[in-house]
Amino acid sequence: MREDTLIGGIGMGYRIGMAVGVTYVIAGLFGPDGRLLRREKRPTVRSSSSELLAEVADIARDLLAQEGVDNGRLDAVGIGLPGFIESDTGLVTSANLPFGEFPVASRLRHLLDVPITVHNDVKMTVYGESLRGAGRGYAYVLGVTLGTGMSSTWISNGKLHEGNGGLAGEIGHIRFPDISYACGCGMIGCLETVVSSSGIARQAREGLAAGWIGPLADRFPLELRDELTAIDVLEAYHAGDAFAAHLFQRTAKWLARALVPTIAMLSPDLIIIGGGVAAAGEVFFEALKTAVADGLHPLYRERLLIVPSQLGEDAGVYGSAEYAVNAMPMKV
Ligand SMILES: [Zn+2]
């Protein structure tokens, strides 16, 4: 355990954290004591890089105006977005946003005249969970996100571990010889192809094709099966579908394959699991804890906690704001 790492380090002014998504921005204005003062979720047009940045700047100005905070009292703005950020140049490349090797931080600095940090949205989400959510008060936190894809982030004493090339934590792209699916990354056999939301939906479709029966099978006859999503599997589980429960347990076992060696290497205090899969609750977490414990020496498993995330869609806002004030590199 460590002393709580609250926002409020350098500057002691206001700061803004933003999660820039594909269709909307969630932004939060934090006071000098680290409290979230105002939060807004706004749809974006995002037709071009400059238009999107102008919208982001407008949201920041509006938050300040709504709270009656003078622009000069803003210390920093942190941005999280889906994409790859080159740590040495700050250039952003995003498949889902109109940025191709685009200098988001320096352009936004020009618009808002405050220091700007830009980082990957998933990492900012886990960073927020680690410092202000489920990981608050813990020194060594491993965050795992199971959503459209799979990613993990290691935070040691409040510091985000980037690794060579910023590639630390991509455990979703570890390949296993008994997985045969093509991954969006270009490889075949990545863990992500079975434990992500789309992986769970695929497991479900294959199980129904193999003859599983129950509420999920009733709701998705053959002609509707392509529409089945991980949310449908979750709903079926809550409706008592034994096959859906089995899918979450199997997903937990898959995930444990990557977590066991990671835990042995890092010895976390806490693992936070976020994303849609975590909403399955006990059926998933109990299977995960059992599978992880099976693979580890008792000394690890006696100390380790595995918990769901707490901050929901605001985690990235907390994380980006924390990152912006914690003297990270790439602040321009
Ligand atoms: Zn992959």
Image: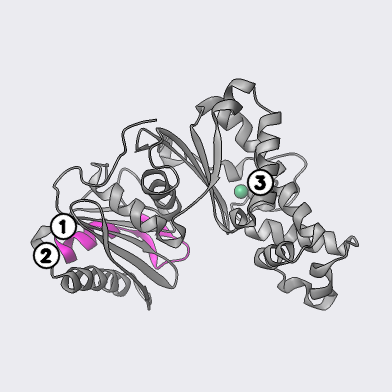
Quadrant in which the N terminus appears? top left
Q: Which of 255 and 13 is in front in this view?
A: 13
Q: Where is residue 234 in the image (x, y as percent from the top left)?
A: 68, 63
Q: Residue 190 carries which label?
A: 3
- Residue 71: which disc? 2
Whether residue 91 is visible: no
For the magenta stretch, what is the residue range? Answer: 92-114
Q: Which quadrant holds residue 328?
A: top left
Give the mark nearest the N terminus, 2 or 3: 2
Other-residue count near label 3 (Cα within 10 Å), few / some / many at <14 / 14–19 / ≥20 = many
Q: Nearer the viewer, residue 9 or 187?
A: 9
Residue at left offset 67%, top offset 52%: 193
Instruction: Out of 258 and 332, give the one closest to the viewer.
Output: 258
Q: Looking at the rendered structure, which numbered label has been put on residue 114? A: 1
Relative to residue 215, is residue 145 drawn left or right?
left
Q: Does 94 sit above or below residue 123?
A: below
Q: Are marks 1 and 2 in contact (CB under 8 Å)?
A: yes
Chain-order first, disc 1 or disc 2: 2
Question: Mark 3 near ligand 1 (CB under 8 Å)?
Answer: yes
Which amino acid is tagged 1? Val
Disc 2 residue type (three-letter) = Asn
Question: Viewed as shown, does residue 74 lie left or right of 174?
Answer: left
Q: Distance between the residues labelled 2 and 3?
A: 46 Å
The residue depicted at 69 percent of the width and 68 percent of the height is: 232
The way the protein has been coloured in the rendering is one colour
**Of pointers 3 and 1, the one earlier in the residue sequence:** 1
Relative to 63, residue 165 above or below: above
